Image (spheres, rainbow, N blue to C red):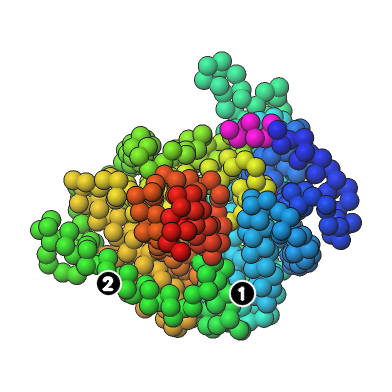
Amino acid sequence: MIRRILKFTAIPMLIVVIVASTFAASFLFFKPPSLNFFFERVFVELLLDDPELLTMLRVVEQIGMHFHNNDLTDASDAHARKQLAKVKDDLATLRRYDTDEMTESQRLSTSVLDWFLENTVDGEPFMYHNYPVNQMFGVQSELPTFMATMHQVNTERDAHHYIERLDKFPKKFEQVLNGIRSREEAGIVPPRFIIRKVLDEMRGFVDNGVEANILYSTLLNRLNEKDEGSGKYTVTKVSDSDREALCRDAQRAIEQSVFPAFQTLIDYFTDLEGRASDDAGFWKLPNGEAAYAYALRQNTTTDRTAIEIHRTGLGEVFRILTEMDGILDGLGLEEGTVGERMLALAEDPEMLYPDTDEGRAMCLADYQKYIDHADTQLDAVFDLRPEIGVHVERIPEFKEATAAAYYNPPALDGSRPGIFYAKLNDMKEVPKFTMKTLVYHEAIPGHHFQLALQQEMTGVPTFRKVIPFTAFVEGWALYAEYLAKEMGFYDDDPEGDLGRLQAELFRAVRLVVDTGIHHGRWSREDAIRYMEFVTGMPHGDVVSEIERYIVMPGQACAYKIGQLTFIDLRNRAEQALGEQFDLRDFHNLILSNGAMPLTILEQLIDQYIAESLETTGEGSAAA
């Protein structure tokens, strides 16, 4: 499907790229006569400004364009302000189009883009209210990961581009560092415990040396990789001497460019540690209360306040704990709090794999087994499926200690499947009863169904395939866990059902602790104690989660708010349509339209209900 879409869109996309790159300056003041052309222009101009995103999506390589693969995306403040100015102009241009002249699909695309652009403009006062380098993300971890997983090396030219990008690490790191200095001048400094985590990560990256470094081993492995069938090198037409020269160039670039770039950040953060405090929440920052309110609105795509979200979380925590308590009693685990009993269950040797390479291989195999099983059991509720598959891999080891499991969608050109990355550095933190739920969330029918189908959509602007809305995307994945329970995937598996409830519980707890930290002035330690007591999750997982919420305010609230919205809208449709309601139609409507703000999703579902009732005549009868 993806290849077919791109086959028919490559030429118009190429024309747009050429026109946009040639007349970019005049484009800023030009309202295209075609709304669809404007949609594509917005997307293409974004791509042209982001070489790393171009590489990730692999859209223009198919038509022989590789101009971007030796460059890195500009991370300077000046570039960010230039982008913001463009967003303001795009929003003004979008609002000059007459909605009465649009098709229904165009009106939906306009609503989605308008919300996204307006929200971006609303964030201008809070441009510095973040920590660009932290234990969850940042140039120090994302850029090496990008080079190792996204920059493809299929030709000698690709290898040269790889090395050219390595040599541009110092420029990118300096751009990021200048932004961090500006934040410090504005009184925005990460907590001390975050700084220490980042320092440990960066020092470990440098101290392991060149030959053990992922940036070197990645290129070395790709240049020396051979096809199993023919025995020939997969990177063809490169002599042995040239392979050796490329590896030497990469070694030189890492020693002289990459490692010194890391050292500039190490030196700065070492000095910054002494000027930081341990206060965790956004309340401590200038205009912090308003910044957190914006973060909640941006991430949940609703207008719910911190107090409302906190209360919702407390109610959900009580409901889920009550259900878990009943299952634990049924298993004969009656002593202690729910959290204490769950912790004891997680430490049961029967629930753990060996903390060895063999144990990790067994775990990955079981993850894939759950993926494959789920894929065969969903016909009753899904008749729309991605054409490209998903498999599980281990998180790259250099960042595994501070990362959580995650999903990467397929490449737009179909060259890379969806990948569920599992965290396996400490097998004591992977109890078997948690694995099914993680699969249903990250792979099938969660992220893989939603994100891969979003990329396969036809007849919509390209931005609709890639635009991120956390509450929709993560809300769907959490809804997928709920759906798996309804489908009987936990029948005769009470421990697995406890894993599902524990996963839902910690999403509900997120509402409590995120708002507690950033609005209620909870300390890091207060939040850790509460989450550990309530959920019974391993201590290391709890610490990673709490520190994630500290550097990504509001993001964790999106999951549960999104799930509750999906469930509420489904209940609304079922009650309104009665026997006419078909769950497959409901899922098709959601998955065929891609991610969007929850407020717009609500309008879409209401329209679906009204049109369904009108078709049967029930709407007019009820009126």
From the top left corner, tell me how far across and down residue 111 is, in percent: 64, 60
Across and down, in percent, residue 233 comes to: 61, 22
Residue 339 x, y percent position in the rendering:
24, 67
Q: Which mark is residue 327?
A: none
Q: Which x, y percent locates residue 391?
A: 44, 38
Residue 618, located in which quarter of the rendered image?
A: bottom left
Left or right, 422 with respect to 134, comes to left
Q: Is the residue 337 above or below the residue 583 in the image? A: below
* Residue identified by numbered label 2: 318
The reply to whether the magenta stretch includes residue 4 is yes
Kind of element beneath mark 2: helix
Observer able to see residue 377: yes
Up the image or down, 478 lies above or below 159; here it is below
User: Mark 2 packing: few (<14 Cα in 10 Å), some, or many (20+)?
Assistant: few
Q: What residue type is disc 1 on? A: His
Q: Main secondary structure of the magenta part?
A: helix
Q: Residue at x 16, y 62 (%)?
A: 326
Q: Is residue 581 above or below residue 155?
A: below
| Left or right: residue 115 compared with residue 592 | right
- Judge whether 279 appears above or below 568 on screen: below
Q: Residue at x 50, y 38 (%)?
A: 386
Is label 1 in a helix, a strand or a loop? loop
The residue that label 1 is drawn on is: 129
Q: In this picture, which residue range is highlighted in magenta?
A: 1-7
Q: Nearer the viewer, mark 1 or mark 2?
A: 2
